[in-house]
Image: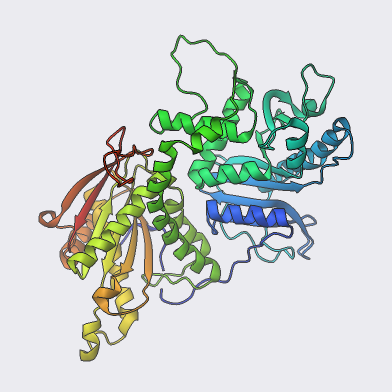
Amino acid sequence: MANIEVIDPSSLEPASEIIHRSRGSTASERLLADLGEQAFLNLWSYPNLFYDKKQNGKGDGKELCDMLVVCGDDVIIFSDKHIKYQSEKPVEIAWPRFYRKAVEEAVVQINGANNWMTRYPEKIFTDPSCTQRLPIELPPLDTRRVHGVVVATGAHKAIQDVMNDDSGSFMIQPSLKGRDSIDFSLPGSMPFCLGDVNPGGMFIHVFDDVAIKRVLEHLNTIADFTRYLNKRAEYLRTEKLFLAHGEEELLARYLTTGMVTGGNYDFEPPRRASAKDFSVMTVQGEWSAYIMSEAYFAKTLADDKSKIWDRLINVFTENVLAGTSVSVLGAQTTVATSERGLRFMAMESRFSRRMLGGSVEGALRTAMEMKQDRYARVIFPAQISADPKLAYVIMILAYPTGLEATGGLPRGYEQYRETRAKMLESYCFVLLSEHRNLNTAVGIAMDAHSSQTGRRGGSEDLFAMRIDNWTDEMVAEAAEAKKHYDILQEERLIKQNLSRDEFPILDEKTDDRRKWSKHKPSRMRFKKKSK
């Protein structure tokens, strides 16, 4: 098919080498690596990267950063510093020492890593011998969004003791610039209080180990976390905030604003145009109020469906990293091409993944209940989607085990996979032909349930296609594919509008705590078909 960009093609032959990923060399680095993998998934988070400082090809690797996350246009540089706080020293001595080692040195590392990535993006390695390059491409400089994150650990107990604060996290005062945080001659100065640690450069966020765990637990997708970093940087540099008693209180303010505004996340609700700027202070207890709220409980229950989408992404990424991924349609698979297709799935927010995961589960259940050998569902973009020009195709195709005895599939399961891949390609092609407001289709094909096939195990195929310009020849090819595979026929389509609320209201009249109201819904359109 001419003039089509196939983003993630594959063959039934293994096509990639094993990708080295460090697990971290210290306890705090391993914690950061685990958090990164849980939140950002393994294909996009790389702990302990290296660069060849001498550039002599002799493997003189120097550590670039403690973790790098790359997905789409977003790049997150993490620097982890675990420094023992000298509690036996007066706070006027211990706090500045801790700040210089845990925060200032991390800021230097992040700025250095960003500078290296800007100048030598092709010279970043996953191993200290500098033999294996970072397997995914950095985004172009003109679209790249770089976020710096310091994880400074070791002072948690000291903050609890000195400040009589159970949270033990750094306070946040945006008016402080750089070393203002350790200048006790300033009026009203306090230890363990941070502001803008990299004034004049990109905003660099500072969290302790408890704060980063809380943030990544509640903003555990790339889309949700980078949105928080962008909003946080913008908010703290406007100096609208006078003081936050800890990261958890700032996070609670952000999440609560999203809850009361129907998903418009920010640190303050929208103001009237006539309202004057003023400084605000977080109130201790906002975090406790949020996590004890009925809305948070309902959201947590509802988000369980999103794990289906996470697991589906992990099925593909684990094969890519292990070098065992297979491709469809006979093309050579690389990490770069596979990442581009999977990136669409990874860029979806937690709320969007809830919708998508529920749709995948519903397609599998319906195909099983109807005992359909072939069943497909098309998920069109909604307001909450990461890409308004992207649709997903979920296709379930049963392996015809009954034909084996008669020689119906001479090459068995391999032939079934090839046929399934060609059919999935045709679904994507026909869909884009008939919906020109879209330019990308991501297809996911799966085996039918074992109750239909009598077989244990199964497989999944991923295929992504982008078409920006159509020719008469391509339109004719799409029409022929639609007829040949008998797909997306209008008379068999069942159309649905699905409404969901990110913070659903629990229904007090029923024990079903998952029942959602129609309050401020986001809509996602579905098409289902039996053949």
> Compared to 97, does 57 lie above or below?
below
User: On the rendered image, what quadrant is the N terminus found in?
Assistant: bottom left
Q: Residue at x 78, y 55 (%)?
A: 53
In the picture provided, is 41 more to the left or to the right than 12?
Answer: right
- From what the image shows, is residue 465 above or below residue 208? below
Task: In this rendered view, identify the residue nearer to me: 166 or 398.
Answer: 166
Q: Locate residue 293: give its quadrant.
A: top left
- The residue shown at (68%, 42%) is 208
Q: Position of residue 499 (x, y in %)?
A: 27, 41
**Residue 378 visible in the picture:** yes
The residue shown at (53%, 56%) is: 41
Q: Position of residue 379 (x, y in %)?
A: 29, 51
Q: Residue furthest left?
A: 491
- Residue 464 position by quadrant: bottom left
Residue 297 lies left or right of residue 406; in this view the side is right
Q: Tell me if 26 is positioned left or right of 353 in this view.
A: right
